[in-house]
Image (cartoon, rainbow, N blue to C red):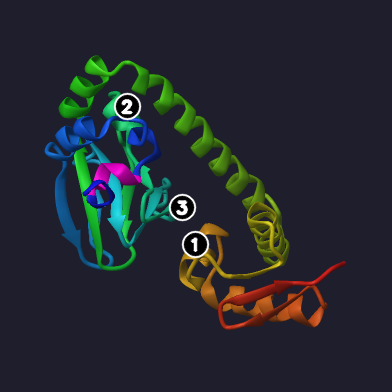
Amino acid sequence: MQADLCVNLVPLFKSLPLSDKEELESLVQHHHYQRQELVIDPATSNNLVIVAHGSARLYYLNSDGRENVIGLLKTGDYAGEDWLFGKENENTYVEATENSEVCLLSRQDFLNLIKARPELSVKMLEQSMLKMAGMQRQIELLSLPKVEDRLLSYLSAYAEKIGKNQFSLPLKMKDLALYLGTTPETLSRKFALLAKQGKLTRNLRQITLLEK
């Protein structure tokens, strides 16, 4: 079934005919990872990583060994296109944040695919630009000195994206804290602060942004 194909989750491959997707799927390796298990590290980074079910975080280690989250991957997200094109991975990791099924596509198989389907290079560039825009938004959030400002900006941007002021928090508190460069405990306090200021209401993961 087309819906069962791991590669069908990735926007990059959605335009391929079903027969090509099935051929590509035969090249993909399916793996199951436990929570906190590494999927990719600098020694094993010559794969495209596709999250088929579950979630993972993409992070790098700075000079003092501190983790800096680059992105949070959920079902259908992928990472590693830079490595497929030969960029060396010096300090980047992908770690499962829950028990997850991950599909890996090797660099050589991917390069063979690009040669056979050169139009995918253009699509890869388009998707990379979208991902870079997302990373830029995160950098802008982290530049805000106050955690409550980062949190409110994130929630406002998400509400604008989905066109609703009432929604379920799209990330778990731990993952959102990592994304915003803080801790779950601090994040809980900032939610309470924003509620006290009349900017939102929160019932567990249900968020309502209030009109200013």
Q: Between disc 1 and disc 3, whose residue precedes?
A: 3
Which quadrant: the C terminus?
bottom right
Q: Earlier in the sequence, mark 3 or mark 2?
A: 3
Q: Nearer the viewer, mark 3 or mark 2?
A: 2
Q: Which residue is mark 3?
A: 68
Identify the disc placed on residue 87. 2
Q: Nearer the viewer, residue 101 or 92?
A: 101
In the displayed image of the protein, which residue is found farthest to the right?
A: 212
Q: How many residues crowd around disc 2 within 10 Å: few (fewer than 14), some, or many (20 or more)? A: few
Asked if the residue at tag 1 contacts the one at tag 2, i.e. Cβ–Cβ closer than 8 Å, the answer is no
Q: Type of residue at label 2?
A: Lys
Residue 195's place in the image compared with 53, above or below, is: below
- 111 in magenta: no
Q: Is residue 89 visible?
A: yes
Secondary structure state at the residue bearing disc 2: loop
| Residues drawn in magenta | 5-9
Q: Is residue 41 visible?
A: no
Which residue carries the number 1 mark? 178
Q: In screen coordinates, is 20 left or right of 75?
A: left
